[in-house]
Amino acid sequence: MQENTFKEISDRVLSGGRISDEEFLLLHDKADIYQLGFLANAIREKLHPEKYVTYVIDRNINYTDICVSACKFCAFFKAPEDKDGYLLSKEELAQKIQETQDLGGTQILLQGGLHPDLSLEYYEDMLRFMKETGIHIHGFSPPEIYHFADISNVPVSTVISRLIDAGLDSIPGGGAEILSDRVRDSTAPRKCNADQWIEVMEEAHNQGLRTTATMMFGHIETVEERLEHLRRLRDLQDRTKGFTAFIPWPFQPDNTALADISVIEKTTGYGYLRILALSRIYLDNFENVQASWVTQGPKIAQVSLSFGANDFGSTMIEENVVAAAGISFRLSEKEIRKLVTGAGFEPKQRLMDYSLVS
């Protein structure tokens, strides 16, 4: 990429300006990894002049793997007629929460399949039971909430209001994948579309819930569709300021219906770092960007702290969805702290809203 063009973009971004869609594509196609890393790191340092990196101690609880969506990129789900499918009992939920709290955990990431037979009242009861433990419940992605509205025949706004009353504290950004209907129609036609995902998040923000945003990239999407995804997130953040963080992570094809498509190759660490940096540059209204050690491993996640990431994510005491695709990286709190320190930062435990744990 020509130095004068890159300098023009850099000067504007570092003075608080915004890049256009055309400039995103230009950086994507022409900038080298050093240019992207320099700019993303400069933005990160401007937003976070403090020399620390945050992380959260939590556990993924997948309350059921029974799902009617049958997404082609998912290796975790079981069809409703599959006798091997499960639904966690209250006793199992309580045990998992207690184990998390014993390890210093502050929240549960609660997600599951789109179960065809559970009512909204079932989920309200689950939340009330879990809330008795005092844990923060970061739960139910937009496809789940849209599914609850559909099976209960009530508006999304009512579902969110009732879940809040039952104890829901925040919403994870799962189920976004790529916010392009061409991609979604091809890979997950039974799941909520791009507009519906945005609708759920906007309604949640309007009702006072903070949420995260994700992007699962590296499957059948085009560069322009990745840009569409980021644009939708940036536009919504302009309207609501409700997202606390952005988490991009690469698709893991093993054991999925997309595994045999020859054009899909696993995203390399190099490719991941480029998209991470581009996301930090484009999403100028997102304060926090999270590293993806779950898919990339600890060393690339460590490098990502120089490519725009200021958060190391979760200890993930338990993780099932990515593991079903054959990825099994595990890190303890001690290991996360060591990696952060080794990258030249001070590790700090946080809560979902990015306030620090004293």
Image: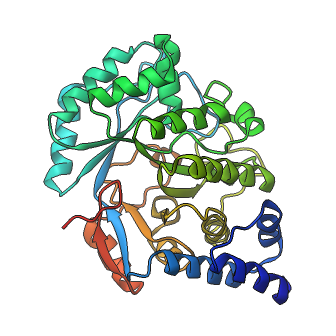
Coloring basis for residues: rainbow
Q: Quadrant of the C terminus?
A: bottom left
What residue sits 35% from the left and 23% below the top?
Answer: 162
Question: Residue 189, position in %: x, y?
Answer: 68, 27
Left or right of residue 300: residue 210: left
Q: Is residue 252 visible?
A: no
Quick one: 225 or 295, which is closer to the camera? Answer: 225
What residue sits 31% from the left and 75% below the top?
Answer: 347
What residue sits 57% from the left and 38% below the top?
Answer: 74
| Label tally | 0
Question: Residue 301, position in %: x, y?
Answer: 48, 71
Question: Residue 109, position in %: x, y?
Answer: 35, 44
Quick one: 255 or 300, which is closer to the camera? Answer: 300
Give the image quarter of residue 73.
top right
Q: Quadrant of the N terminus?
A: bottom right
What residue sits 29% from the left and 52% below the top?
Answer: 58
Q: Is residue 125 above or below residue 138?
A: above
Left or right of residue 169: residue 202: right
Left or right of residue 214: residue 222: right
Question: Residue 42, position in %: x, y?
Answer: 57, 82
Q: Is residue 106 visible?
A: yes
Q: Is residue 90 above or below residue 3?
A: above
